[in-house]
């Protein structure tokens, strides 16, 4: 199932570091490291379309993993 959310990109200093998208309503999604580097800019406001990956876990465990399919910088 595809979702579209709007929020702000954050870098978390956990272990080797982790990327997060914190939505406007406060929900946190973890963004995989292999995502387009244009998206992974701390403080950047974005709209992201992607898929929640419930079949993988990460060491950061900061939220559900959101596999990004498309994004728009706002």
Image (cartoon, rainbow, N blue to C red):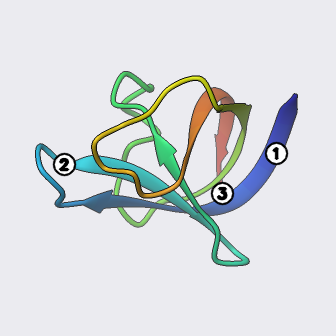
How crowded pointer 3 is (Cα within 10 Å; few <14, some 14-19, many 20+) is rated as few
Position in image of residue 49 (x %, y %) = 75, 36
Spatial distance from mark 3 to mark 1, Cα to Cα?
A: 14 Å
Q: Which mark is residue 41?
A: none
Residue, disc 1: 4
- Place residue 38 in its image quadrant: top left
Q: Quadrant of the C terminus?
A: bottom right
Q: Can you tell which of label 1 and label 2 is closer to the viewer?
A: 2
How crowded pointer 2 is (Cα within 10 Å; few <14, some 14-19, many 20+) is rated as few
Position in image of residue 69 (x %, y %) = 68, 23
Residue, disc 2: 17
Residue drawn at x 50%, y 26% as measured from the top left: 56
Residue 50 left/right relative to 22: right
Residue drawn at x 66%, y 36% as measured from the top left: 71
Residue 60 left/right relative to 24: left
Q: Is residue 68 above or below residue 28?
A: above
- Place residue 48 in its image quadrant: top right
Residue, disc 3: 74
Position in image of residue 20 (x %, y %) = 44, 54
**Contact (Cβ within 8 Å) of mark 3 with mark 2:** no
Judging depth in this view, the residue of 27 and 68 nearest the camera is: 27
Q: Secondary structure at mark 1?
A: strand
């Amino acid at each position: 199932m595809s979702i579209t959310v709007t929020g702000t990109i954050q870098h978390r200093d956990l272990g080797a570091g982790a990327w997060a998208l914190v939505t406007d309503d406060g929900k946190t999604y973890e963004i995989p490291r292999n995502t387009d580097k244009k998206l992974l800019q701390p403080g950047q406001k974005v709209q992201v379309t992607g898929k929640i990956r419930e079949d993988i876990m990460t060491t950061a465990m900061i939220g559900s993993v959101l596999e990004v399919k498309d994004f728009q910088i706002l």
